[in-house]
Image (cartoon, grey):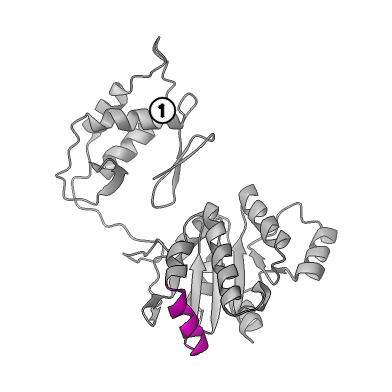
């Protein structure tokens, strides 16, 4: 569970966001959860459970969703500055959970996702990765990730990952990963071909892995068999892109559309100095990258 400071956003493990109304901030959500710990929550429904790591307390997923969805009214503070969420909690318990077992899948129908490949984990198996590269078992790395959205064309990233050759590894992060993170595209020597590095703030991890690999092979990051294929949607992604450019990273693919402030002059400079590529089709881009 992630709570984003300052923007009143609740994000669950599935990547969907519920915006809560005026008067509810992160401290309020924590206060609700503290009160929930003292409530009697029905768990025996035989349905999919969402485990919330809050002092080993388990909350039934539908109850938690009902709770968050119910927090849509302005709750006045008490004289001591606290807020009483008991009415919300009681309503959530009253609503209960699913009457029948529910099946939850990823966007491609997959039932499993593998996560947790931050830079510490990846670098912990760096010797295996390096050996696989030297042996020719891994011939290319892709970092496919970024923002997601409803705009037509974002299925590009699903198709792109599906078309990656069996001797390549896909690093991914941020909400764009939900386009393909439930795909089973196999392993290479026990290393999953999709390595989920986390959310957009974990772009740091991806950079650290790239820098470490460059050090291991005694080359520049741009000389690695690595291609970044990014999906743009909001300002944070632009900040990450500017960071990559400031680090001198070249040959980045970006789409499905370019940021509006990319005038023709700005785009020309980025193409000339950084070899930035607007995406075209998965087939054409894959051919251009791998030859």
Determine the residue positioned at 53% across, 60% down: 205
Name the main secondary structure of what is drawn in magenta. Answer: helix
Determine the residue positioned at 73% across, 68% down: 276
**Residue placed under numbered mark 1 in the picture:** 28
In which quadrant is the C terminus drawn? bottom right
Task: Examine the structure image and report whether residue 135 is included in the region drawn in magenta.
Answer: yes
Residue 17 in sight in this render? yes
**Most extreme residue toward the left, as rendered?**
44
Residue 167 in sight in this render? no
In which quadrant is the N terminus drawn? top left
**Most extreme residue toward the bottom, as rendered?**
135
x, y percentage for residue 290?
61, 84
Which region of the structure is painted magenta?
Answer: 125-137
Say what secondary structure mark 1 lies in.
helix
Determine the residue positioned at 44% across, 51% down: 15
Which quadrant of the structure image shows residue 35?
top left
134 lies left or right of 229: left
Residue 158 vs 287, above or below: the answer is above
x, y percentage for residue 220?
67, 75
Residue 165 vs 42, above or below: the answer is below
Q: Nearer the viewer, residue 222 or 181?
A: 222
- Label 1 neighbourhood size at 10 Å, few (<14), some (14-19), many (20+)? some
**Most extreme residue toward the top, as rendered?**
79
**Most extreme residue toward the right, as rendered?**
265
x, y percentage for residue 232?
62, 57
Task: Examine the structure image and report whether residue 245 is included in the region drawn in magenta.
Answer: no
29 lies left or right of 290: left
């Amino acid at each position: 569970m992630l709570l984003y400071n300052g923007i009143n956003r609740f994000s669950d493990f599935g990547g969907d966001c519920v915006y809560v109304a005026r008067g509810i901030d992160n401290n309020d959500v924590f206060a609700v959860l503290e009160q929930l710990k003292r409530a009697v929550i029905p768990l025996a429904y035989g349905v999919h459970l969402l485990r919330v790591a809050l002092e080993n307390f388990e909350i039934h997923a539908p109850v938690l969703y009902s709770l968050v969805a119910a927090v849509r009214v302005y709750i006045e503070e008490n004289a001591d500055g606290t807020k009483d969420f008991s009415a919300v909690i009681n309503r959530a318990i009253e609503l209960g959970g699913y009457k029948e077992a529910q099946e939850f899948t990823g966007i491609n129908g997959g039932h499993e996702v593998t996560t947790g490949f931050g830079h510490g984990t990846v670098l912990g198996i760096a010797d295996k990765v390096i050996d696989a590269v030297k042996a020719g078992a891994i011939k290319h790395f892709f970092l496919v990730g970024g923002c997601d959205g409803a705009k037509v064309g974002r299925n590009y990233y699903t198709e792109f990952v599906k078309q990656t050759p069996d001797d390549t590894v896909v690093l991914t992060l941020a909400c764009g990963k939900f386009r393909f993170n439930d795909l089973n595209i196999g392993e290479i020597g026990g290393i999953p071909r999709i390595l989920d590095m986390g959310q957009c703030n974990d772009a740091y991890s991806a950079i650290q892995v790239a820098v470490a690999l460059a050090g291991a092979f005694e080359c520049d990051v741009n000389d690695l068999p690595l291609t970044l294929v990014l999906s743009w949607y909001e300002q944070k992604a632009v900040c990450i892109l500017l960071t990559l450019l400031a680090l001198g990273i070249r040959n980045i693919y970006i789409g499905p559309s370019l940021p509006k402030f990319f005038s023709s002059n700005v785009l020309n400079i980025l193409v000339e100095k950084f070899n930035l590529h607007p995406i075209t089709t998965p087939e054409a881009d894959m051919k251009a990258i791998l030859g």
